[in-house]
Image (cartoon, rainbow, N blue to C red):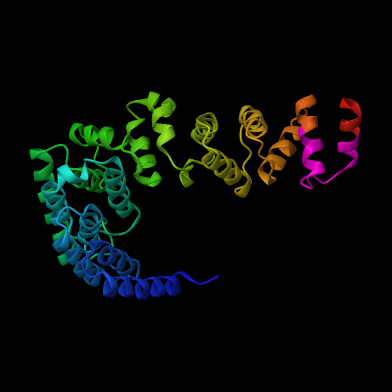
Amino acid sequence: MLDQELLVDIRIIKFQGYIRRKPNRPFGYYGLGVQYMLSGKPALADKMFMQAIKLDPLYIPALLGKLEVFLAEKRFTAAARYFNKHKDLFCNKKISKKRIHRMVSRLYMSKSLSRRGKSIVSQFLLKENFITLNRIYNKTKDNLVANILLSAFWLQDSRVDEKAIKLYRYCIELDEISDKLRWDLLQVLSKKEPDLLQSKKIAGLFSAIPENAYGKDYADFLLTTFIYSGDQKKAIDAFSSFETRRIIPCKKNLWHYLFFCREWNIWDSSLTYCCQKLLSTGWVDGLLTSTIKELNSRGLWERSREFDQIFLLYS
């Protein structure tokens, strides 16, 4: 399999060829800009996005690409102002808003918003950025870029005043922000609103179980939510993540997952793990036995004396 760097180089060549063939199409410049962003070359990407916008000022993918360049270059105030300028276009489609949520909230997991390890000049510039973002937030409450950046910055500063809590409450329900940011927002908000830890709506917005949630009741609550949502990928990935970390889901979730796999005809190693843990609890019934029998027939269960005894009991 080709490595990522080589794949990007190949795509760059392909998009350059596309531009030569169709120089008046914004798609080629946008696609090339994306590859330059993946290569860590935002300046080159910016030129391509601007060329696409020159050809079509309403070409949303390129406008979003330009916004991402501002963020990559840590020009946070410029990014927020750029969002305001094109807000109607960006907010017209959910897919555009979700992409903005993703690209801005990703910064929370980087060092871009942290003051630690930065020079005095860098700290000053960061502070100035967020002073201006705060002014933008005070003027308009619907600037997605300013809202997410401010919430991330205030979280890192451990700010919990009324203004911050109001913003956190808004951001926690945004689609497709990073799980890390959503989890940290929930940790802060649940101190005053413990019922949020039982909110199925918020739980359903997570794409996976956050790393720091394992070992807590909330990890099981997320697994339950994913199972009942019917989202097979989220449910299987979440259950498998318990196994990877050698953590056993609660007994209730083991049964939930067994029924889930049977309902969706899922036969894999995660179901094997589920049945093994159910057996270890000492509770056995016909459903569990028939599931183990089917796993065995598919080569997903290693027969043992214990298995033979159970099979004889329920056959």
Position of residue 42 measured from the top left corner of the image (x, y, whole percent) = 25, 68
Quadrant the C terminus occupies: top right
Q: Quadrant of residue 66?
A: bottom left
Residues rendered magenta in the picture: 291-308
Position of residue 111 measured from the top left corner of the image (x, y, whole percent) = 31, 59
Relative horizontal placement of residue 192, taking residue 311 as reference (left or right): left
In the image, what residue occupies the spot 40% across and 44% down?
A: 179
In the image, what residue occupies the spot 55% across and 70% down?
A: 1
Of residue 222 and residue 236, the one placed in the foreground of this image is 236
In the image, what residue occupies the spot 60% across and 48% down?
A: 245
Relative to 151, say whether 114 is above or below: below
Relative to 259, say whether 46 is above or below: below
Position of residue 145 measured from the top left corner of the image (x, y, whole percent) = 21, 47
Q: Is residue 296 magenta?
A: yes
Q: Is residue 283 visible?
A: no
Relative horizontal placement of residue 43, taking residue 17 as reference (left or right): left
In the image, what residue occupies the spot 30% across and 70% down?
A: 36
Of residue 57 and residue 250, the one placed in the foreground of this image is 57
Of residue 45 and residue 111, the one placed in the foreground of this image is 45
Q: Quadrant of residue 55?
A: bottom left
